[in-house]
Image: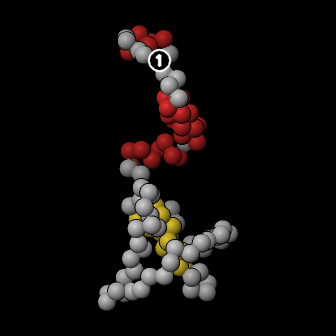
């Protein structure tokens, strides 16, 4: 987990999302188009050496699901299974007990 003292180097291209003004409480509204289709719950705030501010969208994972993202093999298997299900590559299991025994 990053802390406020962590320094990172970012090398990517940015495009303008418009200009926003501060409200009376010094807040900035990002507008509807910035995070329209993102499933996010917060932003990481990064400040560059020249004062540029980068907001990185964040989506926090429940603690009980964290182990999935910390294990690359499990995450890959989960993604593969979801892709197979989306493609209709599924098998109906009528007897779950027998299925589990046969594994």
Characterize the local packing of mark 1: few (<14), some (14-19) or many (20 or more) Cα atoms within 10 angstroms. few
Residue, disc 1: 91
Q: Where on the picture, by quarter, is residue 33?
A: bottom left
x then y, percent, for residue 30: 42, 74
Left or right side of 5 for 95: left
In the foreground, 23 or 98:
23
Image point 42% across, 61% down: which residue? Answer: 36
In the foreground, 15 or 68:
15
Q: Is residue 5 visible?
A: no
User: Number of callouts in the render?
Assistant: 1
Looking at this rendering, what residue extends furthest in the left direction?
Answer: 24
x then y, percent, for residue 73: 58, 37
Image point 41% across, 10% down: which residue? Answer: 98
Image point 45% across, 47% down: which residue? Answer: 66
The scheme the figure's colours follow is secondary structure
Left or right side of 98 for 3: right
Left or right side of 89 for 24: left
x then y, percent, for residue 24: 31, 89
x then y, percent, for residue 61: 42, 51
Left or right side of 88 for 14: right
Looking at this rendering, what residue extends furthest in the bottom direction?
Answer: 24
Location of residue 16 with respect to 24 vertically, above or below: above
Looking at this rendering, what residue extends furthest in the right direction?
Answer: 11
Q: Secondary structure at mark 1?
A: loop
Location of residue 6 with respect to 71 vertically, above or below: below
Q: Is residue 49 visible?
A: yes
Location of residue 97 with respect to 89 vertically, above or below: above
Image point 48% across, 11% down: which residue? Answer: 102
In the foreground, 91 or 44:
91
């Amino acid at each position: 987990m990053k802390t406020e003292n962590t320094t990172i180097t970012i090398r990517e291209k940015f495009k303008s999302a418009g200009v926003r003004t501060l409200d009376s409480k010094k807040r900035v509204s990002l507008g509807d188009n910035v995070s329209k289709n993102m499933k996010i719950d917060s932003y990481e705030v990064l400040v560059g050496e020249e004062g540029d501010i980068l907001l990185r969208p964040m989506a926090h994972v429940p603690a009980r699901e964290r182990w999935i993202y910390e294990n690359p093999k499990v995450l890959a298997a989960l993604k593969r299974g979801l892709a197979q299900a989306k493609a209709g590559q599924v098998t109906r299991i009528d007897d779950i007990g027998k299925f589990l025994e046969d594994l």
